[in-house]
Amino acid sequence: MKKLISIVLPFLILSFFTGCARVDEFVRSHVDEFVRRVKGEPEEPKAGAAPEEKIVFEGRLFWQKALDYEKQGELQRALIYVKIARELSPDNDEISEKMTYLKTAIDQKADQHFNKGLTFFKKRRLAAAREQFIMALKTNPDHKEALDYLKNRLSDKAYKEYRVRKNDTLRDISNKFYKDPRKDFLIAYLNDLEANSPLVPGTKLKILKLDTEMTKPPFDMDKELTDAKMLLEKKAYKDVLRIAKKILEHDRLSQEAKDLRSAVYYQMGVGLSRQGKYVEAINTLKKADPQYEGVAEALQKTTDKELKKAERLLKEKQYKQAVVVAKNILNHDPSSKPARSLINTTYCQMARDFIIQKNYAQALDVLRKADPEHGCVKKALADVKQISQKQAEVHYLRGVKHFLNEELTDAIKEWEMTLALDPEYKKAKENIKKARDVLEKLKQVE
């Protein structure tokens, strides 16, 4: 029987410190199992579990809960769950070490708040001192010095008086003054009351005044997660992202919040893809965790659709748009060979169109943007160079003719066309310089 009490007692403590009207649902669901274990009754088989399956240690579920609370900075709750885990696994050294560590951390954190409060108190910054003493008590409810300062040393102006009404509870009064029923411990401490004792109507209670910051409603992560999931079903994506951000500010390791955020980006990305907005879809999907279910597949499908769009634009000879779409794919996936090949093919076809139009200079300009080793580009470059060299010679000779006729401006234009077709044509470069020098001298004479 004593062992049963030692196991159940931490649950009652947990209920008091968390301010819950009833024991945590998770804890309640396991009480029957604890009682059965204490009585020595055989363990009930778990549905779907293999007979040889073994649990690492009996208190592992409470151990994990303790670690979660520790990450959130809720050291008192973490300590309570560690105590429960130790009751179930008394021989586990890691649990014992964690208990010692948490006790030390709680004492140190409470002392830090108390010392800050003491400093503020000496400077007569009573509101700031009061806040730190409360934080010390919240961290360690047994911190006598913090309680002494709150009860006996702060000015009477820091308190209100409240007369108990019929059916009042400490939680009701705490919720009325502090908008948080979990601060009932503070009223109990200041008035030397037991946490769960009934209140006598007409009794005068001393209520500590708190700053606005201290009376903000508590952050309820479970409620926020539930709300976010409901909003996700309604496709209220902005609201879900806002809640996920708020949760992560409170607990940056919350996987549920991260999954909610990924779910939003996944659903938004899929929706944009269905609308044919592939670039926006890709950019949205990339904001999700790549490991989130469906994201990688959705990205691949959207990329394939974008590639097909680029291929269609190429067939329609909308070359610039095709290149833009293919480059967007490369921005998402620089290793995409189909996108890179499509860009080269597009440049190649653009160049061939210019060749047909006998616009060899523009054909060369386009081909210089492509990969010279790409099959189509390589052949087009060879063709256009052969043609452009012949045309370069034609323009060069025209320039010479204009020069001999003292038509220097026309000569320069022809030689510039020569260089556009054949940038290595040295005589054209030299003649342009000579013609410009002559023009400059003529201006001086005039």
Image (spheres, grey):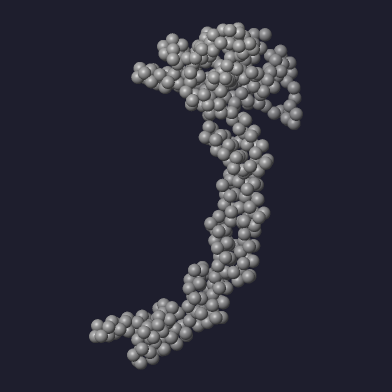
Residue 128: % across, % down: 42, 22
Instruction: Quadrant for the C terminus, please.
Output: bottom left
Q: Residue at x 58, y 44 (%)?
A: 289
Q: Nearer the viewer, residue 81 or 191?
A: 191
* Residue at position x 41%, y 89% in the image: 397
Q: From this viewpoint, is residue 434 visible? A: no
- Residue 9 in which image quadrant: top right
Q: Nearer the viewer, residue 236 or 93?
A: 236
Say which of 90 and 275 sits in front.
275
Residue 122 figure quarter: top left
> Is residue 35 depicted above or below 364 in this figure?
above
Residue at screen point 63% across, 70% down: 316
Residue 239, image x, y percentages: 60, 40
Vertical arrangement, residue 317 with respect to residue 437, above or below: above
Residue 287 image position (x, y, % from top left):
56, 47
Q: Is residue 158 visible?
A: yes
The N terminus sits in image quarter: top right
The spot of residue 15 in percent (x, y) is: 61, 18
